[in-house]
Amino acid sequence: MKLKLTQLKNTLLDPRFINYTIIVTIFLTMFLLIQTNAVNRYIYNLLIMVLIMIVMSTSLNIATGFLGELVLGHAGFMGIGAYTAAILGIALRPYIATDLLLFGASATGAMILAGIAGLLVGTPALRLRGDYLGIMTLGFGEIVRNLITNLSSITNGAQGLSGIPRIMTFSIAFWTTVMIVTIIFLFMNSRHGRAILSIREDEIASESVGINITRYKLLAFVLASMFAGIGGAMFAFKDGFLAPNSFNFLKSVEIFVIVVLGGMGSLSGSIISSIVLVFLPEYLRDFNQYRYLLYSSVLIIIMLYRPQGLMGTKEFDFTKIKAKLTTLVTTIKKRLKKGRE
Amino acid sequence: MAVLEVKHLSIQFGGLRAVDDFNLEVDHNELVGLIGPNGAGKTTIFNLLTGVYLPTEGSIHLNNVSTVGKRPSDIVLLGSSRTFQNIRLFKNMTVQDNIKVAYHNRMDYNIFSSIFKTKKYKIEEARANEIARELLEVFDLLEFEQHLAKNLPYGKQRKLEIARALATNPQILLLDEPAAGMNPQETEELMATIKLIKNQFNVSILLIEHDMKLVMGICERIVVIDYGKIIAKGQPKAIRENKNVIKAYLGE
């Protein structure tokens, strides 16, 4: 009996168990709130938008945060994914009745096509560095948008594509996001992820210890575009309507800003800043045009006082909260004591 | 049998012949010093050996395999590894991760293993941690295992760079001015470390150095170059008395 109790205690204190529990708790809370109509349609849509932005920003974080390259065309990959998924979704709807399966099939197609696009763009682009790569990816994003606008026979051009099945529920969006973030996290903690990090730190040193830098740069770039494709698929099934202008340069910048604000190289940072940067502009609607002033001021202030972003390169860890709190309390106590003396 | 065999190596940068007809053989477990005045072409030779530059003429063989035209990362796989004149660590990574990056090619699991955390992933990672610990122990860096590399003191950063180079399991280690910026005490310590590496890891070492005490103290053989050409070769004692060498360093 005693043995069983210690076993139970060990499982309960296992970091993985704690993380799983917290994720499930978050999901159940949100799910209950939605089911009881405590969350209205407007917020429900915003929640899904947050999840989409989490997928977009964590995927961009592979290329920008971990690999350290300036990529300003992420919305292009999102657009490719969105349109692929939408067209697949419309075509497959008569054959697949289950929403989840339909989303799975379309998102897989979106992921593959966005990945191929990433490979095609990345192969020449990654010979460039810094600003030059930024300009080139920016150009790519615009090319995608223009292609979508002009390929009217497939995408219905500037009028937008409608009639896409609206199957993006909170549950599907939530678990897709959890899956993608987990995959990126596990990937970054492997030898492959370390190789990518080492390229960011010092390309020459990385090559001198036997890392094939071309291969790993391309891998990071392709992975980022694949997950962006899934983000696009989520976006396509959200409103049932797609327009080419959803994937313009501003969208790319928005995703980029989320990554920089959250901290380049921190997945939890991207998650936190996705939440903040989706909700903040919405809640500032009362200020009309002034909200853009406030929005940019927040960005400027954060960049001035915390140039490394909210989280830097660190990850937020639920399991370490207790330890952190204890150290915080002791330092406060010490300071108070010093103050008294 | 020679681990490294260089024949008639030359490189031309525009009108400048930075390295001219350089020949060298380094035997198994031998410690060779490469010295010369500033700008003589020492680091250029290192860059040729590691594949950063493509030679204009000549051949380089590592364990009888030609390395000319191969990528730097592939040359590492053939068994050579280097350090840099100005330290190049992965500054924002932990000391342990610095070693584990270098251990990359000796691990064998694919992306899917890392995503599903398979048994193979766990075994390989555990082995990498073990090897990293062993290496850090040799270099007295074990207590800093979880520190960021940039937070180490200068001398320890140098040591970590050497440890990282060794993690690729090289047969020849190329050290580019390992004692640069060190005080006499640290240099003394470094000499001991280099001797230890040579014996414990059974590698050949080729080192560039300006600190004559270090070079004369530990090198078995010395090659002196000036203006890209070899001006003297031989035992430390002979080099010290060589007229050409004295001329190159002190002038007429």
Image (tube, rainbow, N blue to C red):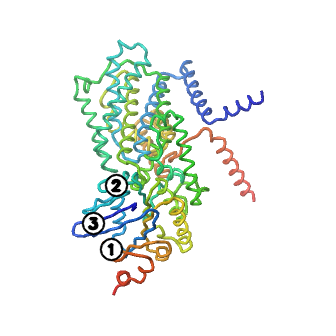
Which chain does tag 1 point to?
B
Q: Residue B230 carries which label?
A: 1
Looking at the picture, does residue A147 appear above or below residue A293?
Answer: above
Q: Are marks 1 and 3 on the same chain?
A: yes
Q: Three-letter amino acid code at disc 2?
A: Val
Gap between marks 1 and 2 measured at Cα: 24 Å
Point out the image quarter for the C terminus of chain A.
bottom right
As drawn, is A119 to the left or to the right of A53? left
Choose between A157 and B245: the one closer to the eye: B245
Q: Residue at x 30, y 45 (%)?
A: A125
Q: Position of residue B206 (x, y in %)?
A: 42, 66
From the image, tell me which residue sits under label 3: B10
Foreground residue, B250 or B57? B57
Residue at label 2? B65
Residue A118 image offset from top left, x and y in percent: 33, 37
From the image, state whether disc 1 or disc 2 is nearer to you: 2
Farthest residue, direction front: B1
| Image disc number at residue A166 | none
Amino acid type, mark 1:
Ile
Disc on the earlier residue, 2 or 3: 3
Lower position in the chain sequence, tag 1 or tag 3: 3
Where on the picture, by quarter, is residue A14? top right
Q: Horizontal and vertical percent for residue B79?
A: 41, 55
Distance CA(mark 2)–CA(mark 3): 19 Å
Q: Residues within 10 Å of mark 3 (few under 14, many from 20)?
A: many
Residue B235's x, y, as percent? 43, 76
